[in-house]
Structures are given as C-alpha cells and as structure tokens.
Amino acid sequence: MSASQPRGVGRRLRVWIRRHVGVRWRLTAAAAVVVAATVAVGGVALVLLLGRSLEHAADVSASQRVQELVSILRRHGLHAAQQGLLAATGESTIAQIVNSDHRVVASSSPIAGEPPLTGQAVSAGGAVHEQLSALPVGDGAAYRVVSQGVRTRGRDFQVIAAQSLAAEESSVRTVSAVLIVGVPILALVAGGVTSVFVGRSLRPVESMRQQVSVITAQDLSRRVPVPEPADELGRLADTMNGMLERLQLAQETQQRFVADASHELRSPLAAIKANLQIADSHPGSVDWPETHATMTAETTRLEHIIADLLILAQADDSGLRLRLEDVDLDDLIQVERNRLRTTTRLEIGGTVAAVRSRSDRYRLSQVVRNLTDNAAAHARTRVDITLYRHAGSAVIEVTDDGLGVPDHDRDRIFERFVRLDDSRARSNGGTGLGLAIVREVVRAHRGAVEVIDNPAGGACFRVTLPL
C-alpha cells in the first residue's frame, strides 16, 4: 500500500461523515472523544505519579530503617542490633545485617536463615538504592531495597532494608481499574449531555429549516422565527429574514419591471398593428404619409424602449462598461443647451464653467440628455443647466419651473417605469426609464444623483461626479 492510499481513505471517510452524520452527532462524538482522551491522559499521568510517589515513600521507609539499625550498631553494637531485629515482628520493612564476608549475622524474623537480600557489596559510608522484582521471601511483589555500609568498632558491616511494594502495586492497580471503567462512563455521560444541549441549541435551526423549506418563489412573504436570546442564532435568523426581504423586494421589482416593460412595448406594437390592419382593410382610403409618419414614430419609440432596457439589463448583470477618456463636460452641457433652444420654446439659462473629467463621453451625454428632456417635459417657461466645481467634484444641476417633485417621491422617481405625472402623454417620448438610466450611469462613474429643493420652485436634479 502506498503512502497516499491511507490519506485517500481518511479523506473519503471525512467526506462520508460530513454527508451522512449530522452536526449534533458529530459534536457529540467529538465531545466524547475529547473527554475520553483528556481523562485517559490525565489518568495515565496520575497512575505514573502515584506509582513514583509510592515508590519514593517505600524508599524513604527503607532508608529510615537502615539509619535506625546503623545508629544502633554504632552506639550499642551488633548484639543490640540483633535483638532489635528479632523484636520488630510487626514491621512491614524487613532488614539484614551482613558482615564483611557477605554473611548474614542478623535479620528480621520473617527472613531468618535466608541469604543476603542483595548481592551488591557496599563499602563503609556508601549507600545503594535499588528495586528488586522479587525476594526469596514474601508474596512475590517487588521491593525497594536500601543498602548502606558502616564501620564500627573495627568491623565492617552492610545494613540492608527492604520495603515491599505490594500495597503500592495494589493501589496502582485499583486506580487503573477505576480509570478503565470510569473513562468510558465519563465519555458516555459527556456525549449524552452534549447531545442534549446541542439538540436544544439546534432546535431553532431546525425550526428555521422547516420554515425555509416551505418558502417558494411564489410566496416570499414568510419569515423564519427569531429565537428569543439575541445570540448567534438570533442574528442568523435576522440575517435570513433580511435576505428573504431583499429577495421579495427584488422579485416584486422584477415582476413590476416585466409588467411595465410588457405594457410599454405593447403600446407601440398595438399602434403599429392597428395602422397595418386599417391599411389592409381600407387600402384606398388610407392616408399613407400620415400612416408612415405614425408607424415611424412608434417604431422609433419601440427602438428607444428596447435600447433603454438593454442598458438597464447590462447594469443589472455585470455593471455598465465605461470607455473612459478626458471629457470636457462644459461641451456636453453646451450641446444640450443649444438643442433645447432649437427644439423647444423654453428659456434656457444657467452658468457653465470649464470642467474636465475622466469619464465615458457617450454615457454622460445620455445623463445630460435624459435630465434635460425630463426638465423640458415638466417646465412651464424655463430650464436652467448649471455646471461648476465643488470640493474636488464636478456638479451638474438641471432645474425647471414646473410643479417640482414631492419629498416622498424623490427616491422613487429614479425607479424604472415611474411617472409621477400621470397626465403626461407618452407621445412626448418618455419611457419611464430615463431617470433610472441616469442613476445607473452616475453610479458607474462612482458619483451620485439626487433631487434637491429649488428655491425658485420646480425640480432641481443634481449630479455629482468625482474628478
């Protein structure tokens, strides 16, 4: 098996778990594994520390017994030490005294007549600590053995004391058994508690899932329930409701746009169809020049609507693509001022400063054309077109002396197919898309367009473009 095969198996296993095991059970399993691993590591450390601690205690006990016997040897001699060993029948530490020939000359009662507990010879003043797996006597348990050499009254002796580790080994086995039984139980308890709490925490998520599952494109008015605490789930529910609200608004806007577009396209098509039917039914009585003029006007109107729709569709899809160049905005303004003077009877005013910007000439000419056409359609006697610099931006203002725009309609007027003046005839050429195109083009230039108060009365459309 190659090294990449185990990684591939592990990857497929993780994918399978993500697809088939829910979040609740993954968290439950993770909690159980973490608790089990933590307790297991802690238990192993506890057993090791406990074993070392008990071994150290046994070593200390054996060392103390050696020091007692060494003190007796030095003060009272070998006979007193022998009597002391024989009298100490209830002690857990066994001891021997070995002479220089490595022959036992005194020992505890349980090991009387036994050979030396250790084969190591220790010179006077030296000490050796060791652990033996078993002694010739006892229950077969390990022992901590301490040997110390001593010279007294011209003779060399070796005092040996051994402390059984049977009790210590029993304690370690008991703790190990408790851990072996307790770790799975703790893991199961931790997993169960985690499952309960995660289930309760995910209950609002399931409620949101059920609510979202019944929301369809035909009815986006429903909202997901918001949990009472203002926690992460509450913010998630608020976010989802905000998304649903935006989707509903976008759907309503799209439906209204389609309906309005259909209505706008139907009008010129109906006029063209009616003229064709009349010409077909009464070819001899048709005023052909008038029919030609009518059909040409409706065809032109249809062409304008389709061109405007294409511009807005491009803006919705990927944003308007601009062909940037240095543009003299005052030239664009002057062209529109001259056009209005020749095509209308309105008084054209305003001041124009020399301003150059990096922009799309064709798109900005659309902006100025749409704003001036809108102003001319609503003005009574006068339209003012003004261009000036302000705070590093170019500002274009188009004002008229008409009825103005109510405050509550100043945002809505830039929506598609919106006409605030229902009495305005479609024969004036309006499609209801001009101001929507103005907003999209200005946004593409990172600018802003707004309707502001006109002290002289009427409407004032202000466009701000960065220079």
Image (cartoon, grey):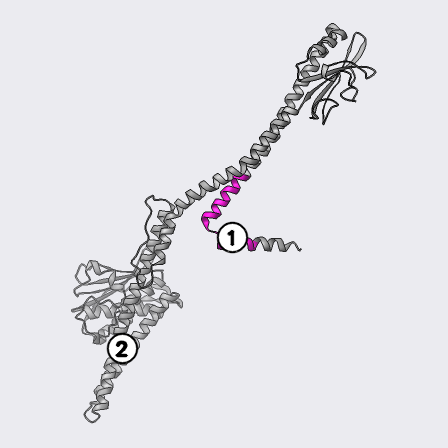
Quadrant for the C terminus in the image: bottom left
Helix, strand, or loop for circle 2? helix
Percent position of residue 278, x then y: 21, 88
Residue in the picture at 25% in, 73% down: 263
Is 18 one of the magenta-colored residues?
yes
Q: Earlier in the sequence, mark 2 or mark 1?
A: 1
Q: Residue furthest top?
A: 76
Task: Name the main secondary structure of what is drawn in magenta.
Answer: helix
Left or right of residue 169, residue 260 in this image: left
**Looking at the image, residue 184 lies above or below residue 380:** above
Q: Residue furthest bottom?
A: 284
Q: Who is closer to the viewer here, 263 or 153?
A: 153
Badge 1 density bin: few <14, some 14–19, many ≥20, Cα 10 Å: few
Quadrant for the N terminus in the image: bottom right
Region rendered in magenta: 11-36
Percent position of residue 56, x then y: 64, 23
**Looking at the image, residue 314 lies above or below residue 26:** below
Percent position of residue 115, x then y: 79, 19
User: Where, by quadrant of the figure, is residue 369 drawn?
Assistant: bottom left
> Which residue in the structure is indicated by mark 1?
17
Q: Residue furthest right?
A: 101
User: Where, by quadrant of the figure, is residue 296 drawn?
Assistant: bottom left
Q: Who is closer to the viewer here, 154 or 274?
A: 154
For marks 2 and 1, give the CA distance: 61 Å
Asked if residue 181 can be seen in this view, the reply is: yes
**Looking at the image, residue 87 lies above or below residue 169:** above
Is 61 one of the magenta-colored residues?
no
> Which residue in the structure is indicated by mark 2?
301
The amino acid beneath tag 1 is: Ile
